[in-house]
Image (cartoon, rainbow, N blue to C red):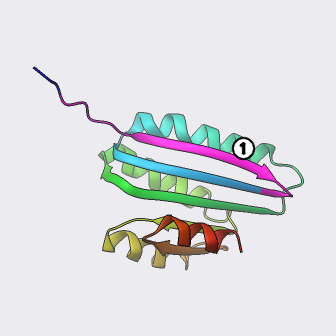
Amino acid sequence: MAKNIKEHGIGIAIKRGNKRLFFEVIMQGKLTHEDYKMFVPIIDRALKEAKGIEEVDLLVDMQAFKGWELLAGWDDLKFGLKHRNAFDKMAIIGNKKWEELSVNMMNHLMKGKSKFFKEREKALSWLLK
């Protein structure tokens, strides 16, 4: 008898080079408060310790994202408000209309640029210009 395992979480890659810091975040499944308890300190520390950095970019892949538990949604809102001016460019990859609308709203709340994409290659190309 096979059991279904509900996979969820936030994958993070942090790359640094040529006075640039690049975060890649992959959101998978229905996120929990525990996911954010692990994710947020990693990003906070990397941003705090980034010295000599002139550009900070973020790529968020939401293609396998299924939503948030209630407290995780609150965690996401707090993270977004706290770091809304931390990124020069933010590319969101997704496949839902509400994700695209959210990115359009974020453009008015952050100092950097944000853009929605349905394809990873196009998102990376835009970020790396």
Task: Find disc 1 in the rendering and name its residue.
Answer: 46
- Give the number of callouts: 1
* Most foreground residue, 48 or 27: 27
Rendered-image quadrant of the N terminus: top left
* Most foreground residue, 17 or 82: 17
* Most foreground residue, 41 or 61: 61
Q: Residue furthest top?
A: 1
Q: Residue furthest front?
A: 121
Q: Is residue 12 magenta?
A: yes
Q: 39 above or below 107?
A: above
Residue at 14% across, 23% down: 2
Percent position (x, y) of residue 40?
57, 42
Secondary structure category for the residue under label 1: helix
Q: Is residue 46 magenta?
A: no
Which of the 4 quarters of the picture holds residue 41? top right
Residue at 60% across, 66% down: 124
Which residues fall within the magenta stretch? Answer: 4-20
Q: 59 above or below 1?
A: below
Tag 1: residue type? Answer: Ala
Q: Residue furthest right?
A: 52
Percent position (x, y) of residue 71?
36, 44
Q: Residues within 10 Å of mark 1 (few under 14, many from 20)?
A: few
Percent position (x, y) of residue 47?
73, 49
* Most foreground residue, 58 or 108: 58
Residue at 66% across, 73% down: 112
Left or right for 128, reference 51: left
Percent position (x, y) of residue 98?
33, 71
Residue at 50% across, 64% down: 120
Which of the 4 quarters of the picture holds residue 8? top left
Left or right for 5, reference 111: left
Left or right for 2, reference 31: left
